Image: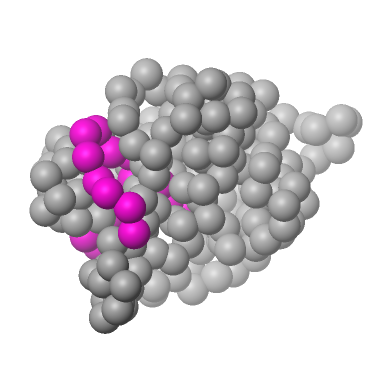
Amino acid sequence: MHDWQLEFIDLALSREALRFGSFTLKSGRESPYFFNAGLFSDGEAAEVLGRCYAAALVTSGVGFDMLFGPAYKGIPLVTGLGIALAARHGRGVPYAYNRKEAKAHGEGGTLVGKLAGRVIIVDDVISEGTAKRESIDIIKAAGATPAAILLALDRQERGLGERSAAQEIEAEHGVRCISILDLNGLLAALEQPADGRSRITPAQLAALKAYRSRYGVGPGA
């Protein structure tokens, strides 16, 4: 487990972006945890999150030329990542994002910035993968190449079949999904005390493991 992954978990817990309880997902499943990147809503959180995204991307070894943030959550995420890459890794990488509504004046259209080369899609989580497929289509339509999808959290959860949404996209489009953290990594970290205190109760941990056993993919499921 990298330090930046533990830093991400502690940030998510401190901002209550990662919560434990009972939550009904879009799929109808009752999940014992919920992640909402919209709660990283202050400058300090944005700076830490950008650093964690940058560390995950650089560690992955994926080659890239620019970044794309799908509207709307992806816009602040891609901005924070761009800043962190410049400040921490010496890479001034261009980025673009889209609007959900076409602009009829000025430069017009739905795309802000120009897509070119190998593009990293930056978002928070992946559920059914519909929004990520739309981003892939936008990038290809611009004549660029989707290089990878960079996420904060991969739930490693089956969709309608036996594969997760991330695995389906990799199989369908050949686009790799990278994450700061996945469910297996989250469970491993939660089992380790932080400064002598637990990040989670035994009951919450047991519920997470049971959910992974029922819906998860990969090792531990």
Residue 138 in the image: state x and y as whole percent: 19, 56
Residue that appears at 51% across and 48% down: 79
The quadrant in which residue 133 appears is bottom left
Q: Residue furthest front?
A: 106
The residue closer to the viewer here, 19 or 89, is 89
Residue at horizontal 40 percent and vertical 23 percent from the top: 60
**What kind of colouring is applied to the model shown?**
one colour
x 47%, y 30%: residue: 92
Give the x, y percent position of residue 121.
Answer: 34, 45
| Extreme residue in the bottom direction | 104
Res. 140 in view: yes
Which residue is rendered at x = 57% and y = 58% of the image? Answer: 37
Would residue 217 be found to the left or right of residue 83 on screen? left
Looking at the image, residue 10 lies above or below residue 194: below
The mark tally for this picture is: 0
The location of residue 71, given as percent across then percent down, is 39, 64
Q: In which quadrant will I find the C terminus?
A: top left
Q: Is residue 125 one of those drawn in magenta? A: yes
Q: Is residue 85 left or right of residue 167?
A: right
Quadrant that contains the N terminus: top right
Asked if residue 133 can be seen in this view, the reply is no
In this rendered view, identify the residue nearer to me: 145 or 37. Answer: 145
> What range of the chain is rendered magenta?
112-134
Side of 18 where 220 appears, left or right:
left
Viewer-closest of 120 and 35:
120
Residue 170 lies in quadrant: top left
Residue 76 lies in the magenta stretch: no
Q: From the viewer's perspective, is residue 72 above or below residue 167?
A: below
List x then y, in percent, for residue 152: 50, 45
